[in-house]
Amino acid sequence: MPLPCVYGYWMHPMSYQTHPTRTTRANRAIEAAELERWQTKPDRQLAYFAFVPPPTPRQYLRAFTIIGKGSVSTWLGTTIGSVLSARVYSHNFGGRILTLRVRGTNGAEYYGRASWDHGTCIWLRRSRHNQEPT
């Protein structure tokens, strides 16, 4: 039996298009492990940011401070923190960098930088003043 073809590419028999429930179960299992790790206040965490309301188009011209409610979440949308402060800076190559300070649902404070122009993914690092003494 030939493999199905989508947009000119052959799909693997175990791909998302042929097994969406298997992929959903796998994503939920990964998220459950991620949330369990989140409660241990990890030093680094991958998250996705969003702001409500989104910044207005004229704010795209230069550096600006984001005013509004922001949150960070997992891939599937579970909120893991709220944004305390956000600022967008332009850099020498023409793009913009977003800096965030986040209060996690686990009680720790995190910070991180990401590209404002390309995607919503950010690596968060735990702030030093919130680390327990060793």
Image (cartoon, helix red, strand yellow):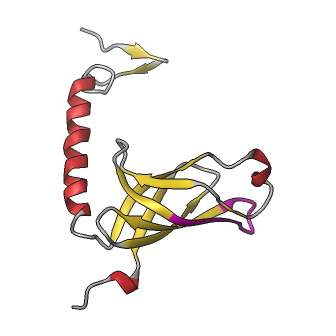
Residue 51 at x, y = what percent?
56, 50
Left or right of 57? Residue 99 is left
Q: Is residue 92 magenta?
A: yes
Q: Residue at (20%, 48%) from the top-left corner?
A: 32
Q: Is residue 22 magenta?
A: no
Segment colored magenta: 84-96
Count of number-bearing discs: 0
Q: Quadrant of residue 91?
A: bottom right
Quadrant containing the C terminus is: bottom left
Left or right of 51? Residue 59 is right
Q: Residue at (29%, 10%) from the top-left corner?
A: 2
Q: Quadrant of residue 18?
A: top left
Residue 82 at x, y = what percent?
44, 59
Above/below status of 25 relative to 111: above
Above/below status of 43 relative to 88: below
Report the predominant secondary structure element of the magenta stretch: strand
Residue 66 at x, y = what percent?
65, 59
Residue 12 at x, y = what percent?
30, 25
Left or right of 134? Residue 45 is right
Outermost residue on the front side: it is: 68
Left or right of 11? Residue 117 is right
- 126 vs 79, nearest the viewer: 79
Q: Residue at (55%, 48%) from the top-left corner?
A: 119
Quadrant containing the N terminus is: top left
